[in-house]
Image (spheres, rainbow, N blue to C red):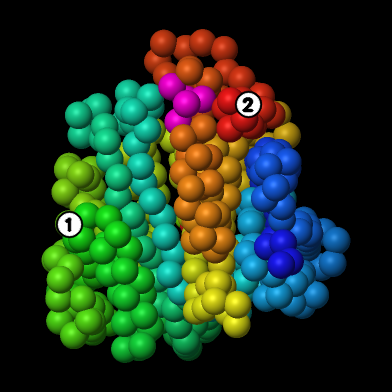
Amino acid sequence: MANPSLLILPGDGIGPEVMAEVRKVIDWFGTQGIAFDVEEGLIGGASYDAFGAPMTDATMERAQAVDAVLLGAVGGPKYDVLDFAVKPERGLLRIRKEMDLYANLRPAQCFDALADFSSLKRDIVAGLDIMIVRELTSGIYFGEPRGIQDDNEGGRVGINTQRYTTNEIRRVARSAFELARRRGNHVCSMEKANVMESGILWREEVQWVHDNEYPDVELSHMYADNGAMQLVRNPKQFDVIVTDNLFGDLLSDAAAMLTGSLGMLPSASLGAPMANGRPKALYEPVHGSAPDIAGQGKANPIACILSFAMALRYSFDMGDQATRLERAVEKVLADGHRTADLMGPEGGTPITTSQMGDAIVAALAG
Ligand code: IPM
Ligand code: MG
């Protein structure tokens, strides 16, 4: 049988640095008889610099062809002046949309060794394990009409459209219910049904999927603003949260901070099954390109490495290997290895991005 294939898109800023550490992990699995066919490409500003576009058709074709895509990060201040259509972020949005990666899984887990690093109190976050399922291919990110126009009164008007169809809501709801069955069996759906028609439809359709297909899973509904408040008040009340594209963007950043560092959180973006039965899939850290620390060996590669662990689990049916990698990360943290983002109030000397990668590979082997 052919090796599973991966397209690696390191992207911008700290993307290439953290991805280099993932390569070490992939190489280590190779020595254990679990080999991947890896190819690399450009995305974001790196692609713009080389080709004048944040994502080329040729790279898009490769992304569609492989078993899974691993992405680092896109964007940077250097590209702020670019036209909206060629900004680095457009490359990411293109790949999400064209691969139809509608279910974005963003786990927020608080590693015990890091519970004191959260801006919240230890007892609020210790043992936290929630999963945010963010709709990723529709809503206000993509809705038409959109644009900036003259308002015919001498000013301008900026327009974006929040739009969701029955099918778009139902399919992401199913992803959330499926995950909940393998976890705490509880889904909390978040929208703004009190002010938005799309929120009313969201609530009704999630309820429909529940009643008709997943009556065994517990379902609750919450307005997204209250959800944000509950996330910082008592995050452990949640198991799986399902929400739309924009609310999911905001709520997942808030959830990330509960865990102590944005440098810890992986994500998976999944679409429909391909001919080989594997879902269309893109794995990326939740953090951005962090241009302020790029190139200095300060970045934490754990989010990107844990994204590869998600690939093992969700694309390649290698749950045991995924768990092994997650345990290695846990061990390294428990042993006190810390990149700069994980330096607590007590201070200390951080290790570099590369040293963190080496420590994780050593823990895997050990
Ligand atoms: C994210 C990011 C992206 C988003 C940006 C980089 C386009 O914030 O993945 O959360 O808004 O979706
Ligand atoms: Mg975001």
- Which region of the structure is painted magenta? 330-334
The one nearer the camera, 194 or 47, is: 47
Other-residue count near label 2 (Cα within 10 Å), few / some / many at <14 / 14–19 / ≥20: some
Contact check, label 1 and label 2, Cβ < 8 Å: no
Side (left or right) of 257 relative to 264: left
Side (left or right) of 320 relative to 134: right
Residue at 70% across, 47% down: 33
Q: How many marks?
A: 2
- For label 1, the residue is 226
Other-residue count near label 1 (Cα within 10 Å), few / some / many at <14 / 14–19 / ≥20: few
Residue 362 circle label: 2
Residue at 36% across, 80% down: 171
Mark 2 residue type: Ala
Q: Residue 181 is drawn in which quadrant?
A: bottom left
One can see residue 168 in this view: yes
One can see residue 155 in this view: no
